[in-house]
Amino acid sequence: MQKQFDYDYSDAELKEWIDRRILSMADRAKTGMIFFNNHVRGQAPRNAQTMIRLLTDAGLTAAASSR
């Protein structure tokens, strides 16, 4: 197990990404993609679902992809 991929982001950390980075990028981009690579104990899908919820709460359109 690689420790660098074994991390579970908190809601506050994800919200900070939205506030500090994603909102400003969304003003300049038509579409975007966020990829979570913290997969050791299945954290990535949970963090992605949380990010979708937080993006929606921030007024952005967010959709899950099966890629």
Image (cartoon, grey):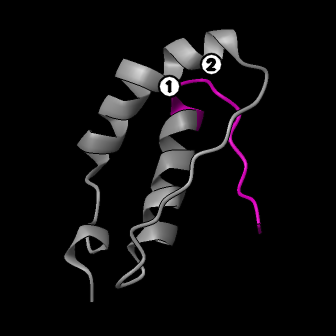
> What residue sits right under mark 2 in the picture?
26
Distance from disc 1 to disc 2, alpha carbons, whole Å, reads 6 Å
Which residue in the rendered view is the most extreme toward the left? 3
Residue contact between numbered discs 1 and 2, judged by CB atoms under 8 Å: yes
Q: On the rendered structure, is 61 left or right of 24?
A: right
Give percent across and percent down for residue 58. Answer: 52, 26
Tag 1, which secondary structure?
helix
Q: On the rendered structure, is 16 left or right of 31?
A: left
Q: Which residues are magenta?
A: 56-67
Give percent across and percent down for residue 9. Answer: 29, 56
Give percent across and percent down for residue 38. Answer: 39, 68
Kindly identify the amino acid type of the residue bearing the numbered disc 1: Ile
Q: On the rendered structure, is 50 left or right of 10?
A: right
Q: Which residue is at the front of the view, 2 or 48?
A: 2
Classify 12 as above or below 7. above
Residue under the point 60% across and 23% down: 59
> What residue sits right under mark 1 in the picture?
22
Mark 2, Cα crowd under 10 Å, few <14 / some 14-19 / many 20+, is few
Residue under the point 42% across and 76% down: 39
Q: Which residue is at the front of the view, 51 or 17?
A: 17
